[in-house]
């Protein structure tokens, strides 16, 4: 259902169920940033190895890839509010065990993997539930704007204050705080979110959502638009060498890392306030090209201030991704949204990981972070332009599904 009026950004918060889902997610994200910092500090304190510290940190990402493709299907086969509650309780227990003093390092790594695996169906359930809560396209998109703004803000606050809190109360207490956030999430969802029956009947194939997505050209193009972000995030992986090249010192690394998410928050706010859902869909191809244009500017070898401006602009225009994900979920049948959302997030995560890795290799080969970032922008623009033209052709078409 579509409306022509553009609701206010905060209109979605008038819905009791969404307020519960939004609050549960936001405070859990804050807790997760504590866990990220606490694990890095805890492992380094025990081993003195930067490699092991980085390896354990990587464990917070890798299980999400497998879980996104597999376990996300549970959000279609069982009641989503129940999946979300169960996942939150499971993470509360697992992170709580991680908080126990003197937990063996091997066991700690296993708990990290399990906690992230449990998160996958919960995340899929939350995304699909939000679309069920809002049948109005405009309100739904506003809800995703709010999620994007608050999630990025929570990540910034959590990472900024996480180190101070962990060094103040200790890694074990920081992990315990994260465990409590998951417990709160479960309680809030149980109290405020309506119990709905399972969206699917469980008779479809386990990867039916993936088959549906790749059979529909519109959805494939939306995936391509999201994968372009893999090039846009390359500056994040090059923050340290870029700061050195700019002659700004180590203190600038944090500023460079913060510029993109701060820009994203501003961009999401402006798009939500001034552009309707339909116009945002229509402009997706153009919006996906703009972050690349900002990155090309690094070819001019900017100083620190201009570099921060360019990264903020890339982040602001990168807020188009909210419209991509919202449109993707909307165009997938309700009974497949959990699995399809897991596929979407997995592809996005893989694209980002590959992009950061390639950016590092190219910067090492060229001996210049500026040149590597500018080259990423140029390649991204060359890819974005044809995708934008394809999007213009397919966005108004109906689904292309084979007979089943």
Image: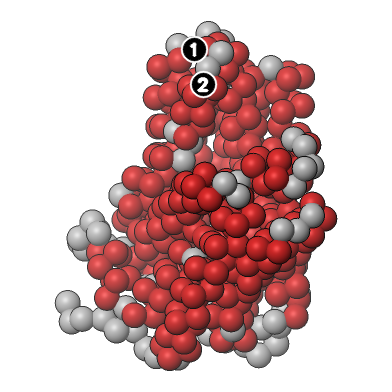
> In the rendered image, which quarter is residue 167 located in?
top right
Q: What residue do we see at 56% from left, 55% from top? A: 372
Q: Secondary structure at mark 2?
A: helix
Give the residue number, with chain letter if any, for mark 1. 103
Q: What residue do we see at 29% from left, 84% from top? A: 400
* Marks 2 & 1, CB-CB < 8 Å contact: yes
Q: Secondary structure at mark 1?
A: loop
Q: What residue do we see at 51% from left, 39% from top? A: 88
Q: Position of residue 18 (x, y in %)?
A: 62, 60
Give the residue number, with chain letter if any, for mark 2. 98
The relative height of residue 395 versus residue 152 in the rendered view (above or below) is below
- Mark 2–mark 1 Cα distance, whole angstroms, equals 7 Å
* Disc with the residue nearer the chain's start (2 vs 1): 2
Q: How is the image coloured?
A: secondary structure
Relative horizontal placement of residue 74, taking residue 29 as reference (left or right): left
Relative horizontal placement of residue 334, taking residue 374 as reference (left or right): left
Q: Position of residue 33 (x, y in %)?
A: 63, 37
Relative horizontal placement of residue 322, taking residue 78 as reference (left or right): right
Q: Nearer the viewer, residue 276 or 227?
A: 227
């Amino acid at each position: 259902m579509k409306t022509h009026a553009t609701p206010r950004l905060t209109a979605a918060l008038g819905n009791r169920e969404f307020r519960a889902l939004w609050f549960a997610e936001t405070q859990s994200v804050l807790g997760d940033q504590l866990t990220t910092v606490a694990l890095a500090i805890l492992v380094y304190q025990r081993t003195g190895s930067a490699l092991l510290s980085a390896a354990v940190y990587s464990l917070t990402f890798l299980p999400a890839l497998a879980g996104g493709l597999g376990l996300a299907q549970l959000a279609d086969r069982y009641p989503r509010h129940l999946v979300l509650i169960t996942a939150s309780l499971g993470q509360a227990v697992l992170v709580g065990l991680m908080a126990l003093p003197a937990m063996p390092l091997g066991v700690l790594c296993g708990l990290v993997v399990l906690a992230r695996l449990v998160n996958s169906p919960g995340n899929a359930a939350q995304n699909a539930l939000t679309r069920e809560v809002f049948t109005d396209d405009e309100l739904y998109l506003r809800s995703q704007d709010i999620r994007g703004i608050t999630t990025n803000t929570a990540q910034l606050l959590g990472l900024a204050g996480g180190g101070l809190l962990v060094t103040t109360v200790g890694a074990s207490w920081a992990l315990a705080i994260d465990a409590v956030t998951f417990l709160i999430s479960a309680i809030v969802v149980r109290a405020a979110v309506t119990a709905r029956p399972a969206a699917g009947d469980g008779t479809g194939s386990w990867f039916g959502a993936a088959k549906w997505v790749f059979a529909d050209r519109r959805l494939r193009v939306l995936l391509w638009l999201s994968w372009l972000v893999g090039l846009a995030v390359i500056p994040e992986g090059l923050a340290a060498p870029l700061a050195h090249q700019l002659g700004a010192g180590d203190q600038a690394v944090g500023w460079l890392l913060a510029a993109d998410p701060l820009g994203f928050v501003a961009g999401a706010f402006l798009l939500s306030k001034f552009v309707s859902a339909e116009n945002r869909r229509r402009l997706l191809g153009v919006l996906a090209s703009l972050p690349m244009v900002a990155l090309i500017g690094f070819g001019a070898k900017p100083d620190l201030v201009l570099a921060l401006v360019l990264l903020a602009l890339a982040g602001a225009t990168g807020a188009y991704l909210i419209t991509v994900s919202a449109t993707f979920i909307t165009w997938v049948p309700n009974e497949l949204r959990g699995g399809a959302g897991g596929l979407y997030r997995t592809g996005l995560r893989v694209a980002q990981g590959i992009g950061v890795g390639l950016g590092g290799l190219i910067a090492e080969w060229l001996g210049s972070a500026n040149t590597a970032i500018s080259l990423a922008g140029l390649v991204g623009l060359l890819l974005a332009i044809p995708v934008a033209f394809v999007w213009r052709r397919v966005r108004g078409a109906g689904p292309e599904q084979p007979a089943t």
